[in-house]
Image: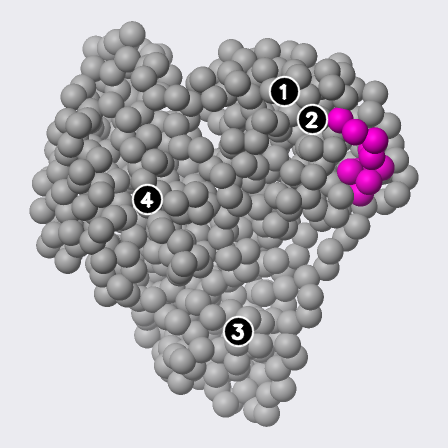
Amino acid sequence: MTGGDALVQTLLAHGVDQAFCVPGESYLAVLEGLRRARARIRLVVNRHESGATFAAEAYGKLARRPAAALVTRGPGATNGAIGIHTAAQDSTPLLLLVGHVPTQAKGREAFQEIDYHRMYGPIAKAVLEPATAKAVAEVTARALRLAVAGRPGPVVVVLPEDVTEGDAGELTVVPAGARPRPGPAPEAVAEAARLIRAARRPLVISGEMVALDGATPALLRFAEATGVGVVTGWRRQDTFPNDHPAYLGHFGIGRAPFQREAWAECDVVVAAGTRLDDITTEEFTLLRDDQRLVHIHPDPGVLARWRADVALAAETGLALDALTAALAGGAPAERVAWRERLHAAFLALTTAGQVPVRGAVDPARVVEAVSRRLPPDAVVVNDAGNFASWVHRYHRFRHPGTQAAPSSGAMGYAVPAAIGARLARPDRAVVAFVGDGGFLMTGQELVTAVQEELPVKVVLGDNAAYGTIVMHQHRRIGRDALYGVQLRSPDFAAVARGYGCAAFTVEKTAEFAEAFDAALDHPGPALVHVKLDVRDISAAGPLDA
C-alpha cells in the first residue's frame, strides 16, 4: 500500500465520497488510489484550481461535511487559494490536498516549490504535512477531524511526491468518531435566560453555525417560544425561513429603514452561531454599549473577540434548545406584535416594483420570476458583485441548506459552486446568479457541468462592467470618474453553447420568464444571458437617482 492508497482509505473511513481536482504529476499516487476507489469516491475534474476549491467549498457548506480538493504544487496551489480563503471566512469544512516536491528537494527552490505552511498558514485552519508514507493516514485523519471541529474550516495537507509513492506498510484505518457536540454551561444558560426574559425588544442574529450545526429547527423553536425577532447575518438568509412572522430580513450591505428602527429599539442581542463578521456588523460598529449581548458559538476564540454579557461556548442548536426550555411560559404578546409589524415591512420591501430601473430589464422582476418557478427547496447560488443585492432582496429562502454565497466576496464563485451544490444536494434544483465579470473568471466550469451531466442553471447578468467598482467610483468620486471598469462582453449565449449548454438571451423583462422556463425544461446545464443597464447597479436604486 502506497501513501496515496493510505490517504484514499482514510478518506473513505471518514465518509469523504466527493473530490474535485485539476490533476498534477506531483500526486499521481493519490490519483491512482482514487482510480481504484472510483466506485466509492466521485472525482470531478475541474478546468481551473479555483473551480475545484470553490466547488469543494459549496459542497461542504451544503453537505455540512468536507469534500477533498486536490491541486498540484506551485501554480496549482496558488490558483486554489481563493477557495481556501472563501472556506475560512465562511467557516466551511474543506480538505485541500497539495502535491509537493520530493522530500530531498525541499528548501532548495525546487521546480514549483512553495512553503505551504507560510503560504496557507494565515487563511487555513491548519497546514499539516506527513514526513513518511506511514504517517499519511494519521495526518489525513487528523486533518479531517480538524476541518469539522469547533468552528469548521479548511485544512491543508501537503503531500511530498515521494511520501505518497512510498510504502505505507500494513494499515488499519480507524473510522471517524462522532463530531463533539459541546453543550452550554447551565449557569450561563440561566443568566442568558434572565437577560432575554427581562428584555423588551430582543433580536437574534442568525449566523453560519446555525447552518453548519443544522440548528434552524432549534432557532424556530426558540423564536416561537420567546417572541424574539430574527435577522440573518451576511449571506446566511437560509438559516431562518423568510416567510416566518419572526423574520426581519438580512443584515447585508445596507439596512432598510424598518431594520434601523428595530435595531434602535433592540435592548438584547442574541448572536446565534455567528462570528459577527464586518458586513453583518457594519464594520464592527453595530453593537451599542447599552445593548446586552448573548453570544452563542462553539469556538472560544470567536467569543473572545466580543464583549459578551453571556458567552455560551456550545453547539448552537443545543444552546438554543436549553434557552427555550429555560424560557418556557409563552411569548410576550407585545414582542410578538412588534416583530409582526416589522415582518410586514420586510414583506413590503421584498415585493418587486419599488425600485426604479433605467434599462429594459428589471432585475427585481428577474429574481421574482426565478423564485416563482423554483420549488421551495431549490438551492440558489450567487457570485460576488453588486448584482447579488437583487437576489438578496427579492428571493425568499424558505428552507435551510438552500443558499450558497461567498461571505468573502470572491468573484468567480457561482458557476463552480453550483457544481458543488448540485453534488451535495443531488435531489435539488440549483440556480446560479453570476455577473459578466465573475463568469469570465470561472465560467469555463460549465464544461465540467456538461461532462458530469449536472443540470445546473445559470442566470448571467451582463452590464459590461465591473459593477461594484462602478458604484464606488460613481458615489465616492463622481459620475465622470469611471475608469478601469468597462468590459467588452462576448456573446455569452454563444459561449455557453460552445461549452455544450443550452443558452438563451434576454434583452427585455417580458422575455425572461419564457427563457428561464426553457432553461429549466432542458435536461442538462443551461444559461440565460440577461443584458442589463449598468445604471441599474443594485437594489438600492439606480446610479443616477
In this picture, which residue range is highlighted in magenta? Answer: 322-331
Comes first in the chain, label 4 or label 1: 1
The answer to whether marks 2 and 1 mark residues whose Cβ atoms lie closer than 8 Å is yes
Q: Are marks 4 and 1 in contact (CB under 8 Å)?
A: no
Provide the residue designation for mark 2. 228
Quickly name the residue at label 1: 339
Closer to the N terminus: mark 2 or mark 1?
A: 2
Dot in front, 2 or 4? 2
Q: Position of residue 527 (x, y in %)?
A: 20, 46
The CA span between labels 2 and 3 is 42 Å
Residue that appears at 14% across and 42% down: 504
Instruction: Tell me which corner region of the image, top left, top right, bottom left or bottom right, holds residue 336.
Output: top right
Pointer 3 or 4: first along the chain: 3
Which residue is under mark 4?
432
| Above/below status of 311 relative to 52 | above
Q: Amino acid at mark 1?
A: Arg
Left-right relation of 334 to 194: left
* Residue that lies at the very extreme toward the right in this rendered image: 187
The residue sitting at 71% across, 26% down in the picture is 227
